[in-house]
Image: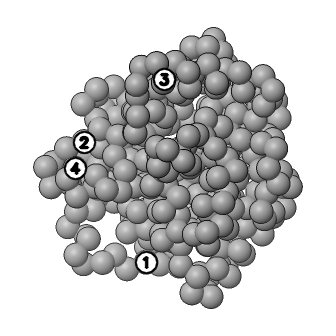
Amino acid sequence: MTHQIDPSVAPYLDLHPEVAAALAAGQAVVALESTIISHGMPFPQNVEMARGVEDVVRAHGAVPATIAVLGGRLKVGLTPDELHLLATDKGVDKISTRDLPVTVALGRHGATTVASTMRIAALAGIRVFATGGTGGVHRGAGSSMDISADLLELARTDVCVVSAGVKSILDIGLTLEVLETQGVPAITLGETEFPAFYSRQSGFTSPLTVQTPAEAARVLKAKWDLGLSGGVMLANPVPAGAEIPAAEITPHIEQALRDMDALGLTGKDTTPYLLGRIVEITGGRSLETNIALVRNNAMVAAQVAVAYAQLG
């Protein structure tokens, strides 16, 4: 399945040669985000994780395409030097879809969130994207109206996002309600309960379930063949050996939320702070879980991408 890049987009887009060749040949490509590198993990674990995840994608038959904005250029696939820059440069902004035009126009560096990674992946013709956890409705959103742009991007951009569910710092029930309202299939792989990032169980029944990556690929083809625009959330539970059970992680999340409130943090600063604070509270265990689930998601995303490419 080849994709013709819009002539108006092409001048802004830099495809890594490996990615360009794979897309031209209709081969499987998996998009990877960069916020997890710049704002989700400390150095050097972030660059080691990023390289390791790319290796996982390759090991399962697909080509990795880590996405970022560097010097105002939309980068689809990064060189080792570009990856290192993202992992170490404190001047890299965390950017969502709304930030793309400013970042591009002013020639800045930006690490892409789920939403902006989806948008750039779609511009390049990539249909499958692996991340750690998807954004959603924040706790207390009834008064703050803090709802991640990831959910709206899923409603309008034709990309499958493979994640370990929505981040457990969020309101999972309300997130699933918003996804339903937006017509986004929230599908869990191999389980009937929706996962909660660090934990395999959230207490919420999954709206939809598939048993294999091949089934997920057939869902993608059917959805887009039917003209049903928008993305798919494929929730892939964290491996059992790496999870932190909900009963154990919940008090740590609540402590991190109290600490955040005391600091008065809001908006896009909240998730990086909370994830970092939970790493501190758990003595690094949550970071190990985060790395394990990202690698697991990369494996499943590669399997979905390969199966989707074979559907022709």
Q: Are marks 4 and 2 in contact (CB under 8 Å)?
A: yes
Mark 3 — residue?
260
Marks 1 & 3, CB-CB < 8 Å contact: no
Three-letter amino acid code of the residue under disc 2: His
Camera-side residue: 247 or 258? 258
- The reply to whether dot 3 and dot 2 touch (C-beta < 8 Å) is no
Question: Could you tell which of marks 1 and 2 lies nearer the N-terminus?
Answer: 1
The circle on residue 3 is: 1
Q: Is mark 1 in CB contact (under 8 Å) with mark 4?
A: no
Residue 50 appears in the rendering: yes
Q: Position of residue 95 (x, y in %)?
A: 34, 46
Q: Residue at x 40, y 39 (%)?
A: 267
Instruction: Name the amino acid, label 1.
Output: His
- Mark nearer the viewer, 1 or 4: 4
Disc 1 from disc 2: Cα separation: 26 Å
Which of the two discs, 1 and 2, sits closer to the camera? Answer: 2
Q: Residues within 10 Å of mark 4 (few under 14, many from 20)?
A: many
Which residue lies under the disc numbered 2? 109
How crowded is the residue under tag 2: few (<14 C-alpha within 10 Å), some, or many (20+)?
A: many
Kind of element beneath mark 1: loop
Q: Position of residue 32 (x, y in %)?
A: 49, 49
Q: State the residue position of label 4.
A: 103
Point out the tag, 1 or 4, that comes first from the N-terminus.
1
Q: Nearer the viewer, mark 3 or mark 2?
A: 3
Real-space Cα separation, disc 4 to disc 2, in angstroms: 7 Å
SS type, badge 4: helix
Of discs 3 and 4, which sits in the foreground? 3
Rounded to the nearest angstrom, the CA distance separating label 3 from label 4 is: 28 Å
Q: Are marks 1 and 2 in contact (CB under 8 Å)?
A: no
